Image: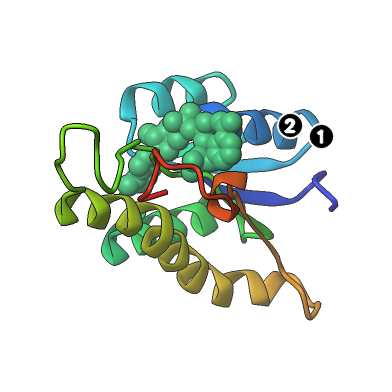
Amino acid sequence: MKLKGSTAVITGGASGLGRAFAERVVAEGGNVAVLDLNKEVGEEFAASNPSRIAYFQVDVTSEESVKAALTAAVAKFGGIHIVLNSAGISSPCRVLNNKGAVHSMEHFDKVIRINLHGTFNVIRLALPIIAKQVRRSSPNVIWLSNCLGNSSFFSPANF
Ligand SMILES: NC(=O)c1ccc[n+]([C@@H]2O[C@H](COP(=O)([O-])OP(=O)(O)OC[C@H]3O[C@@H](n4cnc5c(N)ncnc54)[C@H](O)[C@@H]3O)[C@@H](O)[C@H]2O)c1
């Protein structure tokens, strides 16, 4: 994937894996739009290189919030070439714990809403913009997963 001269939208880019990818894009000569809930850390990161990093306070589950950030990212950098979905939460909880309590649906819905619906929301809204820049059958859309999604580990049932 060519990073030099590219603009990457990175959800969850204020910290962790998303931040690491954002730093790599900038180091390779690209631009980064960080979409993250964490305003304090996101703004501090953007201030480290304001011409190449933009921070937008975004909840990935919100259509309005994501659309506004993508529009602002295009206005600043001229387009979008890559989307990396790293916004997510892990919230360990057993389906049935050793005290006999069952997993709440509110808790389950929250994790699914951010990790699954939020990721899809960003992809569907970013794709029409990326398609204008990336003239290939496979645009640069990446999302993070976890091996726990394929295993029968008991604790992060919502994950
Ligand atoms: N760290 C690991 O070893 C690992 C391994 C496999 C998968 N993952 C998955 O990769 C993703 C990133 O992991 P990480 O360790 O970098 O996590 P992290 O907690 O360091 O970063 C996640 C970022 O997402 C942001 N975020 C959370 N909810 C959001 C929302 N609704 N809208 C916008 N931003 C939101 C947080 O503010 C945070 O900056 C997660 O989905 C995680 O489950 C992590």
Query: What residue is shown with label 2?
Result: 24
- Label 1 or label 2, whichever lies nearer to me, is 2
Q: Which residue is mark 1?
A: 28
Residue at image location 35% in from the left, 36% down from the top? 92
Please say which color scheme the image uses.
rainbow
Horizontal side of residue 110 vs 128, given as left or right: left
In the foreground, 147 or 58: 147
Q: Secondary structure at mark 2?
A: helix
**Residue 110 in the image, given as x and y percentages of width and height:** 25, 51
Seen from this angle, which residue lies furthest bottom? 137
Which residue does the image show at 31% across and 66% down from the upper left? 63
Give the crowd class for mark 1: few <14, some 14-19, many >=20 residues within 10 Å. Answer: some
Query: Where residue 128 sits in the image (x, y, percent)?
Result: 56, 77
Look at the picture and state if 136 lies above or below 158: below
Identified by mark 1, the residue type is Glu
The reply to whether callout 1 and callout 2 are in contact (CB within 8 Å) is yes
Q: Is mark 2 within 8 Å of ligand 1?
A: no
The amino acid marked with disc number 2 is Arg
Residue 53 visible in the shown view: no
Residue 146: image quadrant is top right
- The one nearer the camera, 127 or 143, is 143
